[in-house]
Structures are given as structure tokens and as C-alpha cells.
Amino acid sequence: MGLFGGTFDPPHVGHLVTAVNVAYELDLDVVVMMVANIPWQKQGTRDITGAEDRLALVSAAVAAVDRLQPGRHEIDLGGNSYTADTLRSLAADFPGAELFTIVGDDAAAGLPSWERHEEVVAQSRLVVVDRPGEPVELPGGVDWIRVEVPRLEVSSTDLRARFTDGRPLDYLVTNPVLEEIRRRGLYGVPIGQAGTDDR
Ligand SMILES: Nc1ncnc2c1ncn2[C@@H]1O[C@H](COP(=O)(O)OP(=O)(O)OP(=O)(O)O)[C@@H](O)[C@H]1O
Ligand SMILES: O=C(O)c1ccc[n+]([C@@H]2O[C@H](COP(=O)([O-])O)[C@@H](O)[C@H]2O)c1
């Protein structure tokens, strides 16, 4: 089972392409896209969309995708989200499952700063995918599994900026996610904006 966690504010095609390709390459039955409740290292740097809204976007993103599932364990655990606790919770729910923690190389570089990171390494195999840009030095002492996936220069930060300044979102974010954003009036988009639905 793969654990692919994130803030997903919002989820984009870079996340989805990563998750399906890692599932395929490592022959994982399921990859859980785990929505961080409080991404403590990002908190304070900007306003973060509510966790239930972000979960609804991830649910919309993966609804039609085999092997991908939305995860609400971190929301249910509450408070700051620590991957060490998430892995424990998944291990309790799926006894005996081999766990793979999947991260982009930017997140991988930060592993030593994670809460009880040695537990993360002990409880799971660490999988890293490269994002576009400068190669990142991976923390030592970890037997990283590197998986090549199509590198897409997409980030949630860029998408939020596009919502603000009106640049196109097409092909960077999937239509079900855009519809859910409109339904919920997130990122400054008027609720039920014309062209989607009238709710
Ligand atoms: N384009 C991408 N390709 C591969 N992995 C990605 C990509 N974007 C994000 N990731 C990985 O997905 C996980 C969750 O990322 P996150 O939700 O923070 O997205 P983000 O686009 O980096 O967000 P932000 O721009 O707000 O920091 C992290 O492991 C991150 O490295
Ligand atoms: O466990 C931690 O302390 C920890 C600190 C920072 C990030 N993480 C995890 O790394 C993943 C990517 O995080 P982020 O903040 O880039 O969305 C996500 O699963 C987070 O829960 C985990």
C-alpha cells in the first residue's frame, strides 16, 4: 500500500500522474492520497484551505481512478499531521500490509525535519520521484526507492496564483476538481460559476 500525503491545496495533475505511475511501477494495489490535517511546516506561511474542503477535492480527483483512494486518517487523528502517526494508523487498519511512503524530491529533502522521522523510515519503504528543476540531494541513511514518472512542472502554489490572476487552469487540474472548487467557492471562485452547474 502506498501513502502519498500532501496538503493538496489544490490537488493537480502532477500529484495524480505521480500516484498512478508509482502504483504501476511498484505494483501497489492502492495508493492513498492522504490529506494533511494541519501541514505544520506550511502553517503560518499562508492561509491553508480547510482540510475537509481539500479532502473533497482529492476525492473528486481520484473518484474515477483505479488504485487511488482519498485518505482522511490525518483529519481523523486531528492536530498537526505527522507521517509517523499516519503510518501507525494505516498499519492498524491494514495489518500486515507493506507500506510505501511516496514523496516528491522537495519533500524528501525535508525528511530529517519530520517529527520522529526515524519511525517513518522504520515503518515504511521510502519512495521518491523527481520534480522538474535542480536535482535534490536526498538525505542519507535511507534506502530510497527512486521511481521515474513523467515530470510535470505543476504546483499548487502556481495554481492558486492562476485562480487569482485568471490565467488558464485547463489540463493542470482535472475537471472534477474544478467542479468541486466551483461548488464550494474555493480560491476566490464564485460558487456555482456559470458553465459548470447551478448549485
Ligand atoms: N508536479 C509534481 N510532481 C511530482 N510530485 C509532486 C508534484 N507536486 C507535488 N508533488 C509532491 O506531492 C506531495 C504533496 O505536495 P503538495 O500538496 O505540497 O503540493 P505542491 O504542489 O508542492 O504544493 P505547494 O505549491 O502549495 O507547496 C509532495 O511529496 C510533493 O513533493
Ligand atoms: O511528519 C512530519 O513531521 C512531516 C513534516 C512535513 C511533511 N510531512 C509529509 O510530507 C508530505 C508532503 O508534505 P507537504 O507539506 O509538502 O504537502 C505529506 O505527507 C506530509 O504529511 C510530514
Image: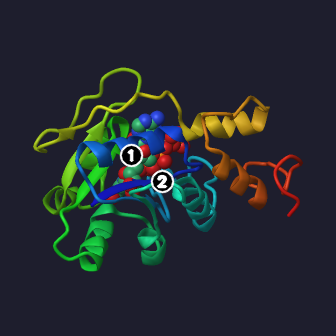
Give residue 124's position: percent from left, percent from top: 19, 58
Question: Foreground residue, 196 or 8?
Answer: 196
Q: Is 125 situated left or right of 182 in this image? A: left
Residue annotated with mark 2: 65
Which quadrant of the structure image shows residue 161? top right
Q: Amino acid at mark 1?
A: Val
43 over 157 or under it: above or below: below
**CA separation in Å, label 1 and label 2:** 8 Å
Q: Secondary structure at mark 2?
A: loop
Question: Foreground residue, 187 or 47?
Answer: 187
Give residue 72's position: percent from left, percent from top: 47, 70
* Image quadrant containing the N terminus: bottom left
Q: Residues within 10 Å of mark 2 (few under 14, many from 20)?
A: few
Colouring style: rainbow
Residue annotated with mark 1: 20
Q: Amino acid at mark 2?
A: Val
Q: Earlier in the sequence, mark 1 or mark 2?
A: 1
